[in-house]
Image (tube, helix red, strand yellow):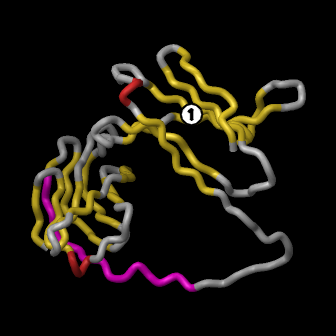
Amino acid sequence: MHISNLGFINNRLHIQTKWTGDDIDSHGDFYLIDTSGNKIHASNIYFGVVKLGNTNYGNEYIENIFDIDNLEINRLNLMGDFVSNGNHTKGNWNTTFKIRSVGKEKNMDFSKNFGTWRANRITVSPLGITLYGNGDFNNSSKIVVSAKMNDGSVQTLDSMTSFSENKKVKAKFLSSLPLDISKIESINIDGTEIDF
């Protein structure tokens, strides 16, 4: 991979990369770091180029676009995470592996009003925390969920998926790491603490 173009367009920083070679899974992305250590991620556009120079569907090029409005660009550092697959084996081969089951879930009653819907039950598993309730889920609402562990550390569940149909709501909050249920001291749902 190399940077094929770099510049500013309409107060946006564009970094275009061209991926070359026979790699089947080399990948990566750029991000900016501010003076407080916060990451600023880009929006990405993937495309290819045909012989006549026109763009088409593909992933030969990646355009990383940063919105830099209200940012002091000279106080930001450009960083990146990149992975090269190195070697890959071609041919007729296969592999097998075992996947352990998720393990037990813990279910409990939980009542909280979120405006357009009310939660009435919660489940906790190594994969995350799920709220069940009734009403209509508001996709624009931000629900903050975390797990306080016995050692005092806090795991924030910062990824959410939701499903709402026929006044039934299911909102699942995922952690970047599996939750060790045996080490959870309490769960915090939008400021409501639940002892575990």
> Which residue does the image show at 63% across and 51% down from the upper left?
27
Looking at the picture, which amino acid does disc 1 mark?
Answer: Asn
The quadrant in which residue 34 appears is: top left
Q: Nearer the viewer, residue 128 or 112?
A: 128
Q: Give the range drawn in magenta.
A: 98-112
Where residue 57 sits: x, y (%)?
74, 37
Give the crowd class for mark 1: few <14, some 14-19, many >=20 residues within 10 Å: many
In the displayed structure, 12 sits above or below 21; it is above
> Which residue does the image show at 79% across and 50% down from the upper left?
21
Where residue 76 sits: x, y (%)?
39, 32
Q: Residue furthest right?
A: 51
Where residue 10 sits: x, y (%)?
51, 14
Indicate the quadrant containing the C terminus: top left, top right, bottom left or bottom right: bottom left
> For mark 1, what is the residue?
64
In the displayed structure, 56 sits above or below 182; it is above
Give the left or right position of residue 170, taking residue 6 as reference: left
In the displayed structure, 24 sits above or below 139; it is below
The quadrant in which residue 52 appears is: top right
Give the left or right position of residue 114, taking residue 74 as reference: left
Q: Please, what secondary structure does the residue beneath circle 1 have?
A: strand
